[in-house]
Amino acid sequence: MLEVTELEKTYDTGDRALKSVSFEVSGNEIVAIIGPSGAGKSTLIRSINRLTEPTGGSITLDGKELTDLGQSELRNARRDMGMIFQEFNLVERLTVMENILSGRLGYLSTWDAFRRNFPPEDISRAREILSRVNLDGVENNRADELSGGQRQRVGIARAVIQRPKILLADEPTSALDPETSREVMNLLTDIAHEDDIPVIINIHEVDLAIEHADRIIGLSNGEVVFNGSADKLDEEARDEIYRGGESLEQKQMASSEAETNISDAVVERGD
Amino acid sequence: MSSNPESWERFDRRERLIRFFMLFAGLVIIVAAWRAMEVNYGYAITAPVELADLFSRMYPPDVGYSTTITGALLETLNISILGTALAILMAIPVAFLGASNTTPNKATYLFGKFIISFTRSVNVIIWALIFVVVFGPGALAGVLAIAVRSIGFTAKLIAEAIEEIDKGSVEAVTAVGASQLDVLIYGIVPQIKPAFISVTTLRWDINVRASTIIGFVGAGGIGVPLQTEINYFNWEAVLTILIAILGLVLVSEAVSAYLRKKVM
Amino acid sequence: MAAEPGSTANGSWERPTAFYSKNVKYGIYALILLFFAYSFWNLRMSPARFIQGLGAGVELISSMLPPAYTPTQRELLIQGIIESIVMAIVATVIGIIISIPVAVMASDNLVPGPIYYIGRSIVATTRSLHELIVAIVMVKAVGFGPLAGVLALAFKTIGFFAKLLAEEIEDIDHGQMEAVTAVGGNSIQRYLYGVLPQVMPRIVGLSIYRLDINLRHSTVVGIVGAGGIGITLLNSFDKYDYQFSMAIISVIVVIVMIGEGISAVARRRIQ
């Protein structure tokens, strides 16, 4: 179970990206975090495994506090959290197999990492996962030979082989076409149910979020403004998340400048 | 604005004046430079004749001599390879200091940049002079001269490759809980490897040429017999050496190009 | 994929290699190591001599600092530097004048086969020999002094300039040449109006670049007697006057850096 309590992040520039964010995730729940650009979605998810260092509050994973861990303890904690990135972030010049196995690096000595000497059970598991994400036979291809959708599935495989207690997905579908996006979302949902782990997904496309998520957290301007099941996300809640409480009509009357913002927000919600 | 419909000029008056002035200044500099050389026209006029005469004395090359230079030729090759290898070893830390995204702080960055530009600005033959004083005449001085001279070039290009790496994949490897060394091995090295290999082979190619001349100041290689034979006016042997050098350079250029193509 | 398919054993995986198999790979690595061991042995350097050398190095550096010169030496230094600069300018001009027809000869789109091969071989020969080798031969042909240096640098300029200019000429737009032919231009007009305007920026840029390179080389060709500051440097080493050597090296470094700076700025402004 992941508990985030009063999480704060203020950047060096003075921007306050997260304002006392609190929520819990447990079981095999799919939680979608939605909100306009700059709402702090990415900062939030990256703060959980401390790729971005939070400036206040607490994060616990299965009761273990993460915010005050030292370097080597943090590495151990990170092994339990699988992360999936918007731009896939594969090591392009390495093979698919190496990219997947890199998920096990936290358990390997540096010398073995250098020799690519992974234990046999990791390798056979990598093969299993490879066929689970529908990528049989590409293990010896270099990552830069794959299509976007294939790369993201390698990214997911890399996270799954960690045997994580939770999956964090930062805009996993933004770089993909709608068809592939849906496939990736289905894959993440399946993994959550089969491996019985929760998944937190940052996502632009509200429709995709409603379709796949059990619960939705709406973030606006660094604050949680909605936290409830997907079917409770009505028009009012969307206004709250995307327009700071004003309705579409009110905003349209405000000014022509605001109008561009609205159209941005509408575009962002994805068609 | 010229309003005469029957005349057309490419540049207006001001532009033409500037162009004319620059051309004139350029010519003045060239003429002044030529005069400053105080060329002895007697020599200058006979230069083509002298050159032709020299080549006629060189021909035919002394084929029998070629066996005596194989040792020196091999030494040249050895100097170029060892020098390049040593240069790379020294260039790697310099490159990490001189790359803005891996350097620990501003001071180390400037230090890296200083080494890069300093080693590059001193010609290999000057480095050879220095190392001959330090280690005595011989191939060791040559290897060190080649190595030190090459640091700047190789470190600069490797630093550029480091600056261009995709931070995302480094971050992804960090996120699975890998140690910093693992991140280096798994996330950074694969990304700079192609640049690394092409820089190495490119520099080796340059160093083969450099290794042929450091013998002029006693730093080993084919330059040593070349200078001796020239001083003894042994022109047929000189031509043999020149042909051997030409062959060595062309072969190493081809090998280096082949290796670069292979890693791309 | 000449390597074994790998999928035979589920728990093992081998990274495909650029070589034919793992054994070949290790064989090649072993050969490389062996070669380095041999080369190292071939230097015949005893550890004692190396350590002695390190001592001598420290001594040399301390005897070089601070750089200094007597009034007579100052004269020599200034004369030598001026001679080097002058040599660089004259050699660049002569080299370029010869290079342009060679470049045309070495462009496969402008000249028939046999001439092309003559052009290419001129380029290859002038590129392959190091400037100091050319200089040492020129010194024997025309005597000590700057003339030998100028001839050597001009010779080297041909290889560089003609090669790069030929590449530029091979990329030109043929339509412009054909247009000049179509309006009845003769072959000289074809070069003047159809080719020259297209490659002029490149000629100017390359000239500045080559001037910079020739300046570097003109400071050292004196070491074999071909004029410039090099001979003064060699003499200072022969006389163990290391403070003066250091002064000369420092001046050379400064001149080279200034030349490089001016060249970089000038080339940027042209583009």
Image (tube, coloured by chain):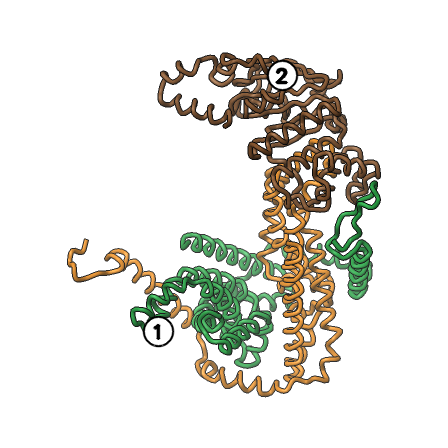
Chain colours: A brown, B orange, C green
Which amino acid type is marked by label 1? Ile
Q: Is residue C98 visible?
A: no
Which amino acid type is marked by label 2? Arg
Residue A169 tag number:
none
Secondary element at tag 1 = helix
For image coordinates 30% across by 62% down, the residue present is B20
Mark 2, residue position: A215
For image coordinates 65% across by 38% down, the residue present is A150
Q: Is residue B228 left or right of residue A13?
A: right
Q: Is residue B179 above or below residue C122?
A: above
Gap in angstroms between the C-alphas marked 1 and 2:
78 Å
Residue C267, percent from left and from top: 44, 55
Residue A45, percent from left and from top: 63, 24
The residue furthest left is B4
Mark 1, residue position: C188
Residue C234, percent from left and from top: 61, 68
Q: Is residue A215 left or right of residue C217?
A: right
Q: Quadrant of residue A99?
A: top right
Question: In front: A55, or A119?
Answer: A119
Question: In front: C232, or B56?
Answer: B56
Q: Is residue A258 left or right of residue B241?
A: left
Secondary element at tag 2 = strand
Front label number (1 vs 2): 2
Q: Is residue C22 visible?
A: yes
